Image (cartoon, rainbow, N blue to C red):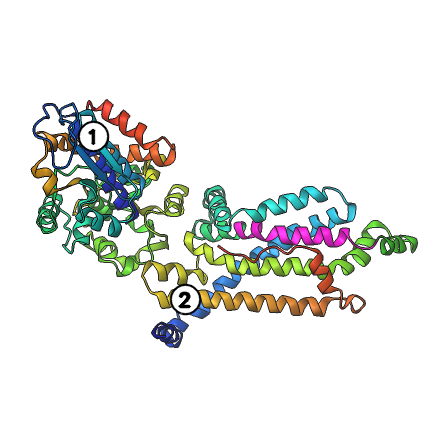
Amino acid sequence: MRMHRKLALGAASLALVLSACAPGEGGSSPSASTPASAGGDGASITIGSAGFYEAQLMAEIYAQALEANGYTVERKLNIGPRDTVQPAFENGEFDLEPEYIGSLLTFLGGEAAGDPDETFASLQTALADVGLEALDYAPAQDQNAFVVRQETAEGLGVSTMSELADADGAGDLVWGLPPECETNPLCSGALEDYGFEYGSLEIESYGACDAPVAQALNDGVVDVAELCSTQPDIERFNFVVLEDDLQSQPSENIAPIVSSEWLASAPAGFADILNAVSAAMDTETLTSLGVRVAVDQESIEDVAESWLSDNGLN
Amino acid sequence: MEFFGEVAGWFGDPANWSGQDGIPARLGEHLVLSIIPLVGAILIALPIGAWIGHTGRFTNLAINVANVGRAIPSLAILAFVAIVSQPFFVMIGLRSVASEAATIVALIALAIPPILTNTSIGIGEVDDEMVEAGRGMGMRGGQILRQVELPVALPIILVGIRTAAVQVVATATLGAVVATGGLGRYIIDGIAQRRNEEVFAGALIVALLSILTELAFTAIARAATSPGLAGQETTAAETVPSAPAGGV
């Protein structure tokens, strides 16, 4: 969950940055804002985010992308968990935030699907009831994923979960799975869908997305681990994320969520700025940026700026 | 109140008293996870502590190293040891118990400081007149250590071992984070599955086991103390700052 949120937030921030880069902004200034000078006409916007690095990174990317287009941005990038952020958003305390589409939909009482388009459509419907709207989602997802070492992927010749289920020698693998896996349809249920017999797997009990399970995978204590798809350990240890080809996990793409009121009076080109950010942010990119922030301890501002500039978005 | 009813219900459920994740099995795993590190720590820390106390060399170094060891959170020690030792255990073919082995190494590291400190200080502070008397009777160094210093310092040494034992019993719980068995499984699995009564029950069993450990070692100390030293234990224990009981 933690990782999911992080990814989602990060993706949202990225989307924002991309949007900022897009050419041709301009138009009327939004409500309650002081005009500035660039394409945003000095429109001012407040960006919120949850309190973990991926969300903050995505929000910062949105912020810098918009600033590059002449917007004046106020940042509230450490609001807290979703159950604090979302009510604040609905109360109008900020105008824009990055979110994970599946987790947000679930939070709003909907049911997230494995197909991002389906999840996104349901999310738009749910958001409309609370005066919010989602812009284009990024390819980047922060979702639970089954991960192997490079040598395992190459040795077995697998890149997807279906291939792993069919691979010779898959029965000898040791799995690092969370204690609640057995009762969780998204864990044991998903594995059964792929054709694994959950009861006959050799399992070591590790929390999903935690450092210990990543360490155990790297050390060879386990062969398959449930991690989060943008977890920095994946890049640090050169793990291979097996593609969830049956879409067993809820889609957790990151999308900019905007207040409908703001959007109605937004300068022309506002959505394009954020959509360009989203389009350029995929899971691997977000993972790499996360490594720079969470492992290398680079500042979120610097990481956002360099990514935007590499992609011509600021 | 309802919650305590649920906890009582958990203890009353026969399913929790049998099988691989039943209380007897988890208790057994926990004892193995506790006894091996304690014995290992005694085998390492007692001779070193005795040598330091007997010769008076490196006393400050030993105490400082031990204190640094105490200052590092148990979870950090466990994480560090897992990173360092797990690949080794996998390499030598102990893959299926690699996380248990790493936990045991971490617990040994945790148990050494109180035993080392109490042994070296306990022996170092044996009255010079006693040592001189032994020497006057023609004892050699080894004999003085075995027949004078160790018996006199025994109550203090046992306090160190008792502190280490309680710490190890409480901290072995953390092994569950890296996939070991033991009573920590109730806490970690209970949290993961939002079964609060199981978390509470697990914590309760660990707490009871820690108290029993403390009482058992107190009884051992009483029985093992030379009659000539009886009554000194309290004083001796107070002169040596005992390590904080193990926690997360």
Q: Amino acid at mark 1?
A: Thr
Residue A72, numbered circle: 1
Q: Which residues are magenta?
A: B106-127
Label 1 neighbour load within 10 Å: few <14, some 14-19, many 20+: many
Residue B200, numbered circle: 2
**In the picture, which quadrant includes the C terminus of chain A?**
top left
Measuring from the top left, give residue B20's x and y in whole percent.
Answer: 40, 66
Residue at (15%, 31%) from the top-left corner? Answer: A43
Query: Tag 2's secondary structure?
Result: helix
Subunit bearing disc 1: A
Q: Nearer the viewer, residue A33 or B28?
A: A33
Measuring from the top left, give residue A303's x and y in whole percent.
Answer: 30, 29
Measuring from the top left, give residue B50's x and y in whole percent.
Answer: 73, 51
Answer with left or right where residue B135 lies relative to residue A88.
right
Q: Main secondary structure of the magenta part?
A: helix
Answer with left or right where residue A183 lies relative to residue B122.
left
**Separation of disc 2 and disc 1 at Cα?**
51 Å
Residue at (51%, 47%) from the top-left corner? Answer: B77
A270 w.r.t. B232: above or below: above
Residue A47, numbered circle: none
A181 w.r.t. B216: above or below: above
Subunit bearing disc 2: B
Q: Nearer the viewer, residue B108 or A23?
A: A23
